[in-house]
Every structure is written in C-alpha cells, then in structure tokens.
Amino acid sequence: MTYNQLGFALTGLRTISFATIDASHKKTGVANLITSIGFGLDVNDHTVTCKAKFSFEKKKDQPFLILEVQTIFEIEKNDFENKIKQEDNTYLISSGLAIHFAVLTVGSARGILHSKTEGTLYNEYLLPTIDVKKMIPEDVVFRL
C-alpha cells in the first residue's frame, strides 16, 4: 500500500444510511441542514474513521433527506505508534489532520448525495460548502 507524505491512506468509504422521507418533505420553504461530524479509532488496525451525518428538514425535527457516510483512514504503523499514540496512553488526532479527514469525508458525501438523488426531486438539495474548521476547533483525543 502506498501512503502519501502525511503517513495515511484513505482505505474505505461507506454509506451508513440514506433515506428520503416523502411525508416530511414540503415543496415550499427553506430547507435547513443539520450536520454532525465524529471520529473513531481502531488501535489494532491503525485506523481512524470519520463519520458525517446530514439531515435536511423543512419542518423542525422532521428530516426529509438523511445521509450518513464513513471514511476509513489507515495510518502508517510507525506514525500511529509514534505520533498518534501519546505517552499517557491516549491517542491524539491533531485538529489539522482531523479537519483534513472531515473535508475528505464531506466531499465524498457530496458525491454520494448527488448519485443517490440523481433523477429525483431530492437532487436539488446539495451539500453546501461546510467550514469544518469551526466544527473541529481542537485536537481529537481518544482515551481508551
């Protein structure tokens, strides 16, 4: 496997959930987008996962379009052991790296959303640019 200069490779992309809910969709009105981003860690496989979930709604708490995706990043073993693993047995993903992973995940989700909604009335709902830097203001630390 070839790793880029940052010592990781994007090794997986999954659509965890996708749903359109016709009963919750209104043709008029402004659509709100609720976005969440989270991270996971697998110490044995030296992988970091990034999950992003997007819910479009026009009625509060009644989404009409839901997409959740997960990307898997394999960290080079040496970098994982020497840079991610900390002396206090925590695992640290720097905010810069976490933001990079999130940007790749959101971009992937944008393509998945288009592909899954192509040819339907839901294709007009695009993922806008998202400032993930505001969503990840600090390093991500795992305490196992």
Image (spheres, rainbow, N blue to C red):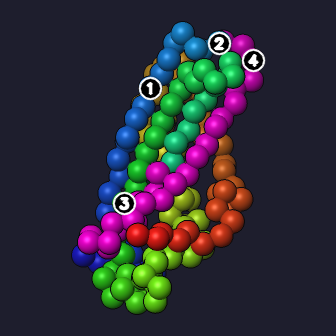
Q: Position of residue 108 (x, y in %)?
A: 46, 50
Of callouts 1 and 2, the N-terminal one: 1
Per the rendered image, the range of residues in magenta is 27-51
| Amino acid type, label 1 | Ala
In the rendered image, the quadrant that contains the C terminus is bottom left
CB within 8 Å, label 4 to label 3: no
Percent position of residue 6, x then y: 45, 81
Q: Is residue 70 above or below residue 68?
A: below
Residue in the picture at 60% in, 15% down: 25
Is any atom of residue 73 visible in this view?
A: no
| Residue assigned mark 1 | 19
Give the label on residue 29, or none: 4
Please give the residue where the numbered disc 3 appears in the rendered image.
Answer: 72
Q: For mark 2, what is the residue?
A: 26
Task: Give whichever of discs 3 and 2 has the lower sequence position.
Answer: 2
Q: Residue at the spot x=48%, y=36% of the render?
A: 67
> Does residue 124 belong to the magenta stretch?
no
Can residue 39 be found in the magenta stretch? yes
Q: Amino acid at mark 4?
A: Gly
Instruction: State the SS at label 3.
Output: strand
> Dot 1, how many residues are within 10 Å of its Cα: few (below 14), some (14-19), or many (20+)?
few
Circle 1: element type: strand
Give the residue at x 42% y 60%.
Answer: 40
